[in-house]
Amino acid sequence: MKILTYMTRTDEIPQLGILHKEKDAVIPFSLLDIDYKTMMETILHLTRAEFERLHLAQVDGDIPTIPLKMLKLCAPIRKPAQDIICLGINYADHETEVSRYEIENLAKREPYPIYFSKRVNETTACYDTIPAYTNLVDSLDYEAELAIIIGKDAKNVSEADAEKYIFGYTILNDMSARNLQTRHQQWYFGKSLDGFTPLGPYITTSDELPLPLNLSIRSYVNDELRQNSNVNQMIYPIPRIISELSQGMTLKAGTIISTGTPAGTGMGCNPPAFLKPGDVVRCEIEGIGALINTIGE
């Protein structure tokens, strides 16, 4: 089931709905007497009975729908409660291209994952513009990533039980200013500028994507294929990530964990092919959808 946040042309407040399985259309929560106002409320409070109601509605041929083309998509979680947890160097082929670009000494694989946080005041919706910061950034890059949405508070979780704590998955484009990463010898600032967290277009619930995942992940710049891999190529798999992070640290419901990117980023091209104003970036993950954004000024 794909859950989304959207606005109609007359709305001023975002609404929640699900995609119909057989139509390019949305079923509003309100038609099913489900009254959550935000995705965070849904994650925290959705009951099993409400989940089943939504699940049945997505294949109901008689239920009223709104054509998707009439709606503006919003980021599924517009204002995360906490910074996003990210993994660095979680695909072996990306490890190679990072080594080539010589971003500090973090390209060397260790026996433990590299975790860092990405500050986000507000996520960027599908089709919205990403600022280029041309006065600050000379090497703007994209990173298509699978993002995990934690569904309930997780503390000291075993790998065997990790899947029970996943609400769903979405796409995150981990936009990066490579010159800031290099200058400051860490990843936080160069990945945390306003607008650098495109997220969406939907959240696909975990029941549709059971572990282990076997999903293609791709990115395109102006329709040129750049990244082309599968999430099964992660060095550190999802159960390990959730279990390890939850040891001694509570992962609150609604936590977003971005699981790293495969090779094919702009810094990995020869010569590097960084983004410029007017470029269109499309990140796709099988079973979730496509996250599309244009680079602004």
Image (spheres, helix red, strand yellow):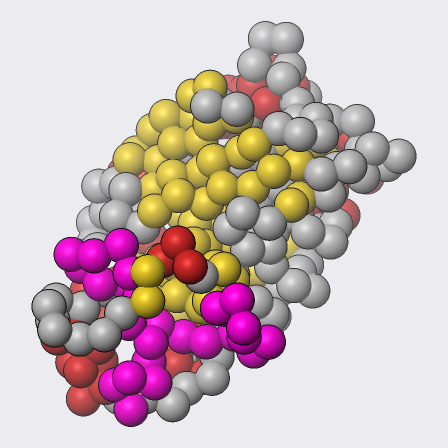
The residue under the point 34% across, 47% down is 289
Q: Is residue 135 left or right of residue 94?
A: right
The residue under the point 66% across, 30% down is 278
The residue under the point 86% across, 36% down is 136
* Figure quadrant of the N terminus: bottom left
Q: In this view, does 131 lie to the left or right of 199?
A: right
In percent of width and height, residue 97 lies at 54, 20
Residue 69 in view of the camera? yes
The residue under the point 33% across, 76% down is 28
Q: How many marks?
A: 0
Closer to the camera, 97 or 111? Answer: 97
Residue 31 located within the stretch drawn in magenta:
yes
In percent of width and height, residue 285 lies at 34, 42
Q: Is residue 19 above or below residue 93?
A: below
Q: What span is in magenta?
A: 7-33
* Figure quadrant of the C terminus: top right
Q: Is residue 100 left or right of residue 38?
A: right
Residue 255 in view of the camera? no
Q: Is residue 240 above or below residue 220?
A: below
Residue 122 located within the stretch drawn in magenta:
no
In percent of width and height, residue 203 lies at 36, 61
Using the rendered view, name the quadrant where residue 294 is placed.
top right
In percent of width and height, residue 230 lies at 30, 34
Q: Is residue 239 above or below residue 43?
A: above
Using the rendered view, name the quadrant where residue 91 is placed.
top left
